[in-house]
Amino acid sequence: MLKLHDVHAYYDESHVLRGVELNVNPGEVVTLVGRNGVGKTTTLKTIMGIVRCRKGSIAFDGRPIESLPSNAIAAAGIGFVPEERGIMSTLSVAENLTLPPLVRNGDGWPLERIYQTFPILKERQRAVGTTLSGGEQQMLAIARVLRTGAKLILMDEPTEGLAPVIVEQIGNVIREIKAHGVTILLVEQNVRFATGVADRHYLMAHGRIIEALTNAEMTSRETELLEHLGV
């Protein structure tokens, strides 16, 4: 579904991505794991066209997207859940959910299904989005993308700063999303969380993918990887 080949990206003259190679198959949950500052978030932003791909290729469903603007990439069926969540501060929960347009030929979740999966959002649908707790805002950010019908969801550190009980809820949501056939590329530093939801993992360092791991390999090397990540 998604293939990156020799992808390079910069912030001004700072060379951040240095030949990223990865692929994500339909229905998979795949993680990008690595220390802070190695290029994980930049990889997601480059896929979305927020950061320009200066060299290399990005293909989604066999179609090159590296030269497309972000709105066209979103319309093609890629949704982005940023680390800062991007909740509109002047809109209610329900308005935040229904603001983004549906993806053409997508399979958007109706509000009834959203509220069944995220009952707290139904309970607080009239509340201003930014009055929700951090965990509730994370669920709103994920639910908003699901409603658009995106086929591939990019998630950036969805468990960052959340209490363990909320992290467990986010894990359950990701597993449910996967069960409905949605594909996910997930940036995550919590190794135990990553192995609990993902099929495969890419280890990133210095702007490159240095290793591809199965979930079994990731689990067996958990202690080593925790040391590598400085956790």
Image: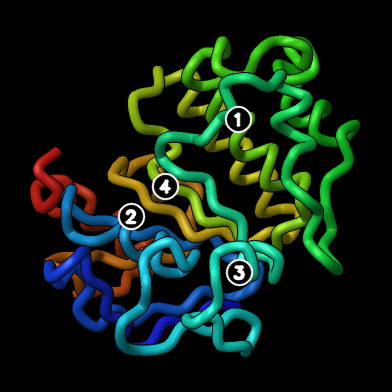
Q: Which mark is residue 156?
A: 4
Q: Please state the horizontal and vertical placement of residue 209, each as a whole percent of the image.
A: 24, 74
Query: What amino acid type is highlighted by mark number 1?
Result: Met
The disc, 4 or 2, on the residue closer to the chain's N-terminal end is: 2
Q: Of label 1 and label 4, which has the lower sequence position?
A: 1
Q: Nearer the viewer, residue 171 or 112?
A: 112
Residue drawn at (28%, 45%), measured in percent from left and top?
Answer: 189
- Which residue occupies the foreground of this view, 159 or 67? 67
Residue at image position (59%, 28%) is 88
Q: Which kind of residue does numbered mark 4 sit on?
A: Asp
Q: CA distance from mark 4 to mark 3?
A: 17 Å
Quadrant housing residue 181: bottom right
Q: Residue at x 42, y 47 (%)?
A: 156
Residue type of the residue flagged with mark 2: Thr
Q: Which residue is mark 2?
A: 41
Q: Earlier in the sequence, mark 4 or mark 3?
A: 3
- The C terminus lies in quadrant: top left
> Judging from the image, what secondary structure is the residue with disc 1 in?
helix
Does residue 112 sit above or below 66 in this rendering? above
**Pointer 1 residue:** 139
The residue labelled by disc 3 is 73
Q: Residues within 10 Å of mark 3 (few under 14, many from 20)?
A: some
User: Circle 2 — which element?
Assistant: helix
Left or right? Give the position of 227 relative to 76: left
